[in-house]
Amino acid sequence: MDVRTDATPYHHGDLANALLQAARDLLEEGGLEALSLRGVTRRAGVSATAAVPHFGTLSGLRSALAARGYDELADALTRARENFPPAELSAQRESSGGRQYPTAAQAVGNAYIAFALANPDLFQLMFRNALLDHDRADLAAAAGRAFEALRLLSGHEVPGGAQAARMAGLWGRVHGLAVLAIDGMLGPLLKGAESASLTGFLQAALEAAG
Amino acid sequence: MDVRTDATPYHHGDLANALLQAARDLLEEGGLEALSLRGVTRRAGVSATAAVPHFGTLSGLRSALAARGYDELADALTRARENFPPAELSAQRESSGGRQYPTAAQAVGNAYIAFALANPDLFQLMFRNALLDHDRADLAAAAGRAFEALRLLSGHEVPGGAQAARMAGLWGRVHGLAVLAIDGMLGPLLKGAESASLTGFLQAALEAAG
DNA sequence: TAGGCGTTCTTTACATCGTAAAGATTCATG
DNA sequence: CATGAATCTTTACGATGTAAAGAACGCCTA
């Protein structure tokens, strides 16, 4: 017997997206520990197990969220590369004959760090493979896109098989600075630095020679 | 009325250490998610809440474990610096006049990465500040020791306020490579590299110029 | 258009977890 | 030897992930 008299219909219509949005909110508000299936469904106003048909387990929800993160990261990296050089620098570049590709690669690195700082908890989730299910097709596809875009970190090719090691070195540096900054580990170093702003300090750290 | 007739005494004697050892075992076996207060006490053969007098909450247990990790990391870094140069290289160093400090700094970086690869889950725990309680004196002290030892990453001083940025750059590179390797992110890059071994690849990535 | 089926969502249930509180036991200190 | 502090157990409670069964809905087909 149909006893539903209130306005909310039995079927939500777009519950998967609503749950993902709620999950992202919870993640931003309380970090990874605050991301729970029950919390997500509670915020979306549905029953405690309503996420099961869409994501299965908690790891499924996390993976769907991480997939979105990888999509956004891939977009941010390719956008940083395509929008380079910025308009205000094109005149200078033409006159001085400065190298375009290296600084374009720097712009990609800056975009990587900017994404991490803008979405710290999502970024951490994306790189905790133990919490994710890489068998999910959407996650594997999005991560692949991001890794492909990551090659823009390297501005120029390098002879021999050293290209992979070079990529890893560049990636390691931007990734390490990103996670150290997210976890608040750079506080003491930042205090003894010239630039008071975190992004300025990270910029200097990126440019400092090894 | 005393009804205890079995051999196990009511007081354990060294439960704190036993719990920490059990915690470390659980961490190595099942990762961060497997580290639970109840699991630790279960493995130690005591009641479910026996850890409370020693560590308080779960975050307290994690912090005590992380403190041990920082102690070990500090030891590993200082040992790597003090044991440099290795005996087989001292003759070459004297004859060629090679720079000692930069390669000693490399040895410190290698020790950092070696520690992370040898204790992946402990390493991850140490750098997740949201899970730790830095008000605990032992954790703050051990972390301070490790950060002090970390300065050995920089082989020589640098003029002006750029020293902090240089330190961050060096730290970021070794830390980033360590966490990327731990999370299995370097697989695709490793496949297209010369050296098949992970440590050899990381070595090449460290030396690759930016 | 009516019936049936798969999907979506709810309800119920259960094991496990962190943690608080109170009691039992032992140690230490006077 | 007595008293209090520290250690450990027992009990209890709310929250979580997940499994299973049932209700409501959309859709496809006869």
Image (cartoon, coloured by chain):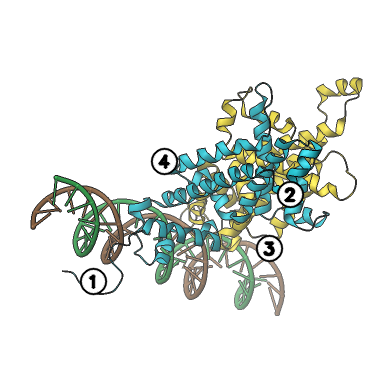
Chain colours: A yellow, B cyan, C green, D brown
The label number, if any, that marks residue B88 in the structure image: 2
Please give left or right for residue A62 compared with residue B14 in the image.
Answer: right
Task: Tell me which amino acid carries mark 4.
Answer: Ala
Residue B20 point in image, percent of width and height: 44, 56
Q: Foreground residue, A52 or A29?
A: A29
Q: Would you identify the image quadrant in which residue A130 lies?
A: bottom right
Q: Are marks 1 and 4 on the same chain?
A: yes
Residue at the spot 70% in from the left edge and 28% down from the top edge: A204
Q: Provide the chain ID for the residue under circle 1.
A: B
Whichever of labels 1 and 4 marks the residue nearer the N terminus, that label is 1
Alpha-carbon span between mark 4 and mark 3: 42 Å
Q: Provide the chain ID for the residue under circle 2.
A: B
Q: Would you identify the image quadrant in which residue C13 lies?
A: bottom left
- Label 2: how many Cα within 10 Å (few below 14, some 14–19, many 20+): few
Disc 2 is placed on an element classified as helix
User: Mark 4 or mark 2, which is nearer to you?
Assistant: 2
Q: Is residue B80 visible?
A: yes
Alpha-carbon span between mark 1 and mark 4: 37 Å
